[in-house]
Amino acid sequence: MLKVDGGKTQVLFDHSAQFLSAPSSYVSTSPSSPSDTWNKWVCEMECDGILREWDSQRIGTLSRGGVFSPRATDSGGVQPRALIGSGGMRAIPAYMARNLEIDRPKWVSKARQNKDGTWRLWHYQEELDDFDYLVVAHNGKCAARLMKSAGPALAPVARLLETKFGANLRGGSTPRFMQLCSLYVLMVVLDGPVPLPTPNLEGAFVEGVPALSWVADQGAKLGQNVEKGPENEGTRRAWVIVSSPTFAEEHKVPQENIPIETAAEVTSLLLQAFRLALGKEGREYDAAFKVSTSALQLWGAGNPISVADVSEEVPFIFQASTGCGVCGDWMLAPSIPAAARH
Ligand SMILES: Cc1cc2nc3c(=O)[nH]c(=O)nc-3n(C[C@H](O)[C@H](O)[C@H](O)COP(=O)(O)OP(=O)(O)OC[C@H]3O[C@@H](n4cnc5c(N)ncnc54)[C@H](O)[C@@H]3O)c2cc1C
């Protein structure tokens, strides 16, 4: 959420996941397979108005210089559907968690197994409850450290959680460690009007511009009117601009504490790249790209670029002797459907 007009107008941004790809129609596989469960959730969320369709004609590929092509059709000549959360993607996890008791934010900093096999957790100095099972739904340095310190029996679990970082996969197709890439996300309100190749362009994967991977108009996508401010003629636009993994690697800093000068440089470079993608670098467009307000997010552990060696049918790891499980998108693929299926 960004505030404009001296705090009077709030502009909503999807600054992580952008949309869900769904089959063109509901397809039931075997009654209890994980993909069937996901399809049912999607149907349920659509019926309850949590998900709504984003017109696939308005999503596509933006090639350097301002060439927009809508999404390709599947082998049957049908465009796959794109679904988004009503009022933002946050609606999806909120819906899925509606019947669960969730205590958050609660960073788990220590985990120990009790003599009776239950798990005791700590949030820094605060001792939390005892739990029958522990599920680690994340990987990376913190998760590996947490399990490494949980005792020798957890060493194999800790090893599975270790990751390396980098935009490109190291060590061939079966790397020794899981690998994660980073992504910068720029949320920006521009004075506009943003000169688009077609008014249909609302979201696009970017090609031919090394710094970028995705851009999307948050006003059009989320149905919010951000256009009219006290100092413009109703031309204002809100865009989310997602970097490429390579760009994020080149400009990586601690994500909790992005230095002001890095934020300014990255913001400027991503905006230049956006103009390059649209083919509107000329000075005559400077006014349209004037920044009204912006915010920058670095997803240090953004997306997995390698996946664990698990099967589609059992897309998680469970150590029965300790009651400890491991799951996450990195079991299958870097997407919400893959994460939801574990
Ligand atoms: C910029 C970006 C754009 C994306 N776009 C899309 C898209 O368009 N479509 C799509 O399907 N997917 C997209 N993805 C991927 C999608 O967001 C992920 O695949 C999905 O969120 C993974 O879910 P997860 O539950 O496995 O992990 P996460 O969503 O990463 O959840 C892990 C959680 O564990 C918490 N955690 C970690 N350690 C601890 C601890 N010690 N104590 C307590 N909590 C802890 C974290 O805070 C986090 O909330 C995108 C990702 C990024 C970064």
Image (cartoon, rainbow, N blue to C red):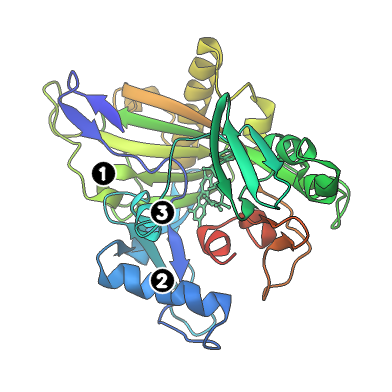
* Residue pictured at 45% horizontal, 51% vertical: 204
Q: Which residue is mark 3?
A: 93
In this rendering, the answer to whether 157 lies above or below 250 is below
Q: Which residue is mark 2?
A: 41
In this rendering, the answer to whether 104 lies above or below 296 is below
| Mark pair 2, 1: CA separation | 27 Å
* Residue pictured at 38% horizontal, 22% vertical: 283
Which of the 4 image quarters holds residue 143?
A: top right
- At label 3, which amino acid type do we have? Pro
Q: Tag 3, which secondary structure?
A: helix
Between 313 and 235, the residue placed more toward the observer is 313
In this rendering, the answer to whether 262 lies above or below 36 is above
Disc on res. 157: none
Q: Is mark 1 within 8 Å of ligand 1?
A: no
In this rendering, the answer to whether 3 lies above or below 72 is above
- At label 1, which amino acid type do we have? Gly
| Mark pair 1, 3: CA separation | 22 Å
Marks 1 and 3 in Cβ contact (< 8 Å) = no
Q: Residues within 10 Å of mark 1 (few under 14, many from 20)?
A: many
Q: Is mark 3 within 8 Å of ligand 1?
A: yes
Expressed as whole percent of the image width and height from the top left, the position of residue 78 reads 44, 79
Lower position in the chain sequence, tag 3 or tag 2: 2
Between 236 and 256, the residue placed more toward the observer is 256
In the rendered image, is residue 290 in sight? no
Q: Which residue is mark 1?
A: 219
Q: Residues within 10 Å of mark 2 (few under 14, many from 20)?
A: some
Q: Nearer the viewer, mark 1 or mark 3?
A: 3
Q: Is residue 254 left or right of residue 284?
A: right
Expressed as whole percent of the image width and height from the top left, the position of residue 195 reads 32, 39
Quarter containing the C terminus = bottom right
Expressed as whole percent of the image width and height from the top left, the position of residue 295 reads 40, 25
Which of the 4 image quarters holds residue 249?
A: top right
